[in-house]
Image (cartoon, rainbow, N blue to C red):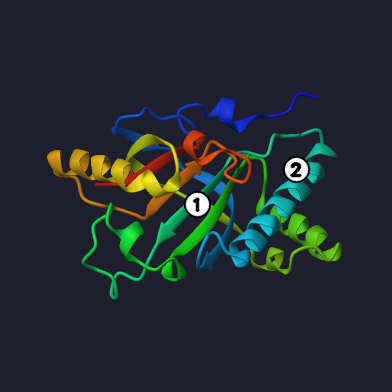
């Protein structure tokens, strides 16, 4: 049985240039788990563990029905309370907003054949094994980004503001306006990869 690999099926979704470019992103289904706080803290790690445990539970369930797939790359949407912090630009926000105030939605893309029922069954399996409690908060999430600016950032997360500034310049030069929240796709496993070798797609929905 051949495994479905979404990174190969949707190559344009999981690839980007090292310079800003305008793209059109197709709707897709995800496992999703929201949270708030420092991504280097234990809460973020526990939520990540719950998301992966559920993704693999769904994978093994699908495999029983001859629909195996490779669990795709981790993604995350990031935002903050703009009523409190409305004077920072896209590139200034990471350095000026306390990490405790960052809000996020962890995402793992699912194949089109995975249903809400499959997700619920996967969650129930994880909970039955007394795995991470946050599994009960996971949801089936459909996202439609559409027109977006993206670029590949190579290097540590701390240097992302430089890439975000380039995206902002690209957007301003074309008269585009923000139309969604900041999106990151982690092509590298940041738990195992040296910071200078990290590869992250930065994506900003626009209109």
Instruction: Residue at 50%, 68% (x, y): give it.
Output: 37
In x, y percent, where is residue 134?
Answer: 68, 67
Instruction: Pick the quarter of the image with the N terminus.
Output: top right
Q: Is residue 96 above or below residue 62?
A: below
Q: Could you say whether the residue bearing mark 1 is in a helix, strand or loop?
A: strand
Q: Nearer the viewer, residue 38 or 5?
A: 38
In x, y percent, where is residue 111?
Answer: 63, 39
Whether label 2 touches label 1, CB < 8 Å = no
- Near mark 1 (Cα within 10 A), the count class, few <14, some 14-19 or many ≥20, is some
Q: Nearer the viewer, residue 91 or 146?
A: 91
Instruction: Residue at 45%, 28% (x, y): give it.
Output: 12
Q: Nearer the viewer, residue 77 or 65?
A: 77
- For the residues labelled 2 and 1, the Cα–Cα distance comes to 20 Å
Instruction: Residue at 37%, 45% (x, y): give it.
Output: 159
Between disc 2 and disc 1, the foreground one is: 1
Q: Which residue bears the numbered disc 1?
A: 76
Instruction: Residue at 59%, 38% (x, y): give it.
Output: 193
The answer to whether any part of residue 180 appears in the image is yes
Q: Which residue bears the numbered disc 2?
A: 59
């Amino acid at each position: 049985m051949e495994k479905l690999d979404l990174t190969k099926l949707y190559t344009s979704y999981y690839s980007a240039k090292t310079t800003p470019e305008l793209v059109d992103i197709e709707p897709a289904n995800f496992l999703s788990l929201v949270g708030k706080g420092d991504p280097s803290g234990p809460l973020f790690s526990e939520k990540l563990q719950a998301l992966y445990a559920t993704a693999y539970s769904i994978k093994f369930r699908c495999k029983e029905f001859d629909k195996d797939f490779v669990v795709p790359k981790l993604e995350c949407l990031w935002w903050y309370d703009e009523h409190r912090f409305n004077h920072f630009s896209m590139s200034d926000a990471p350095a000026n907003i306390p990490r405790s105030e960052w809000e996020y939605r962890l995402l793992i893309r699912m194949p089109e054949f995975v249903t809400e029922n499959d997700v619920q069954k996967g969650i129930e399996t994880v909970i039955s094994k007394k795995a991470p409690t946050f599994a009960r908060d996971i949801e089936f999430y459909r996202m439609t980004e559409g027109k977006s600016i993206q670029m590949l950032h190579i290097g540590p997360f701390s240097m992302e503001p430089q890439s975000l500034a380039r995206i902002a310049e690209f957007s301003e030069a074309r008269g585009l306006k923000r139309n969604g929240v900041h999106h990151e796709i982690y092509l590298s496993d940041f738990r195992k990869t040296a910071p200078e070798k990290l590869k992250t797609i930065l994506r900003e929905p626009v209109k």
